Amino acid sequence: MSKTVITLLLAFLSLTTADAKLIKVLAIGNSFSEDAVEQYLYDLAKAQGDSLVIGNAFIPACSINMHYDNMKSSARRYAYRKIVGGVKTEEKKVSLQRIILDEPWDIITLQQCSLLSGLPESYRNLPALHRAVKLLATNQNVQIWWHMTWAYAKSFSNANFEIYDNDQDKMFKGIINCVRNEVPKANISRIIPTGTAIRLIRRHKGDTLNRDGQHLSLTLGRYTAACTWCEALTGRSVDGNRYHPSTITTDDAKLCQLEAHEAIFMQQLRQYDLVF
């Protein structure tokens, strides 16, 4: 190999290393954040040269009000899932305060539980939760983002779905309405539009993105969510990312990446109506 080629290669590697990002992100969520961040997100970021420290403050079906109450009472009710270097650990019976203080998080995401995600009145404590989280965070430059979740499958059979008249479109419109009108009241402007990405890919794959009507399928559903998070967090287009699990074909992975990228683009333009 010539000296010129070696020099160019070293220069390229130096630029690539300098451009690599280390991002520490904490999701204050529930099983829907589990679907989004705990499986494929780390590997997607790694494939494009970035490194993530991922935390998930997990309580099943935990709502905004429950998170806020837990903050006020320092309740040790969380399972703290953390991914460092691709290795996931879990600590049980942890307070939200300790989870927030565990790292100087760059980004902390909030979300509503799925059942209430399209009901404006359920967001009343979001501004207070936002203030409490930001006040406790040790990184003075921390950003608080919103994780927009998805509507239930059309086939979901559960009394809870009656809140939305068992109508996927009505639920999704309610979620969009809350993202437009309620989330900004908490001074949150950055949205991770997982719900939009799932909506978009349903156009191609039908209503098959859920494993139980609510939670995402272990393959395309979770992979689409992870692609959406990866592009939102790193600012790099996920379209063309080399990573996908062996359970997903290359063509399907490409489709997930494209729809995640489209969802991010639509979110930036605030063009929510284009998904109907």
Image: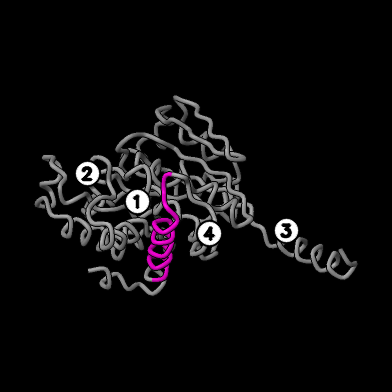
Spatial separation of the CA atoms under disc 4 and disc 1: 34 Å
Residue 109 point in image, percent of width and height: 44, 50
Q: Quadrant of residue 5?
A: bottom right
Q: Residue at horizontal 86%, vertical 67%?
A: 7
Q: Which residues are magenta?
A: 247-265
Helix, strand or loop status at disc 2: loop
- The reply to whether discs 2 and 3 touch (Cβ–Cβ < 8 Å) is no
**Magenta stretch containing residue 143, yes or no?**
no
Q: Amino acid at mark 1?
A: Leu
Cα separation between marks 3 and 4: 17 Å
Where's the N terminus, which quadrant? bottom right
Q: Nearer the viewer, mark 4 or mark 1?
A: 4
Is label 2 in contact with label 4 (beta carbons under 8 Å)? no
Name the residue beneath numbered marker 3. 17
Residue at point 34% right, 51% down?
126
Residue 189 or residue 265, whichever sits in front: 265
Give the mark nearer the N terminus: 2 vs 3.
3
Q: CA distance from mark 2 to mark 4?
A: 28 Å
- Disc with the residue nearer the chain's start (1 vs 3): 3
Report if the CB atoms under discs 4 and 1 are less than 8 Å apart.
Answer: no
Residue 270 as seen in the image, left or right of residue 239: left
